[in-house]
Image: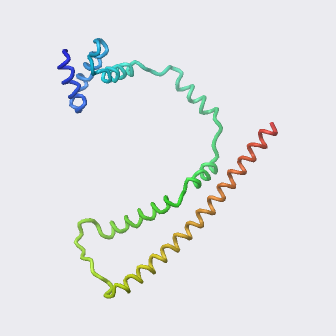
Amino acid sequence: MDTNDLKLLLERYWDGQTSRKEEDQLKAWFLNNPTPEGLENEAQLFTYYSNQGKISLSNDFESRVIDQLREEEPVSNSAKTIAFWPLLTNWKVAAVISGIVVASFVLKNPFGSSTQMTDTYDNPQDAYEATKAILLTISTSMNKGKKHTQQLMKFSEAQDIISEVNVKSNKEGS
């Protein structure tokens, strides 16, 4: 295969139009021929692909992995539960709430429905006051949820301090 044929075949490869046989030809060509100028990256790639087929696991691989898993200490479920709370931040809560609001709107008014929006208030000032009252109610509810989240984070911090004290006392006692 000459350089022009190689470049055409590579172009077909990058377009996803080559067969398995053609890809094997590319691997073999790059393994057995000097690399043309400008195709060094492709040569490295196809040499890598060729070498991957030769790699295999040792016969005792599975038993070694099982032995290592048996040697590890089991993790208590409470540690997993507590570790979640420090990751919970206000923006995640807001994202979930906004996702629920959007989902409820889409389910209530699917896209493509021909519902006509009508004004419920004749006076814009009345509409403004009603909107303000609703947003104040929602804000109050969200602030209540924020207080609970902060309490949980304090609990998690206390658990972390207790864990550190236990680790230090275990090291000193040894």
Residue 173 position in % (x across, y down): 82, 39
In-image side of 47 versus 15 (left or right): right
> Which residue shows up at 52% across the image and 74% down it?
140
Q: Quadrant of residue 88?
A: bottom right
Q: Residue furthest front?
A: 37
> Which residue shows up at 21% across the image and 31% down it?
17
In-image side of 163 versus 140 (left or right): right
Residue 26 position in % (x across, y down): 26, 20
The residue closer to the viewer here, 88 or 36, is: 36
Decide: is 37 above or below 116.
Answer: above
The residue closer to the viewer here, 76 or 103, is: 103
Residue 53 position in % (x across, y down): 37, 21
Residue 170 position in % (x across, y down): 77, 41
User: How many numbered callouts?
Assistant: 0
Decide: is 43 above or below 160.
Answer: above
Q: Quadrant of the C terminus?
A: top right
Q: Quadrant of residue 2?
A: top left
Q: Quadrant of the N terminus?
A: top left
The residue closer to the viewer here, 168 or 74, is: 168
> Which residue shows up at 63% across the image and 49% down it?
79
Q: How is the image coloured?
A: rainbow
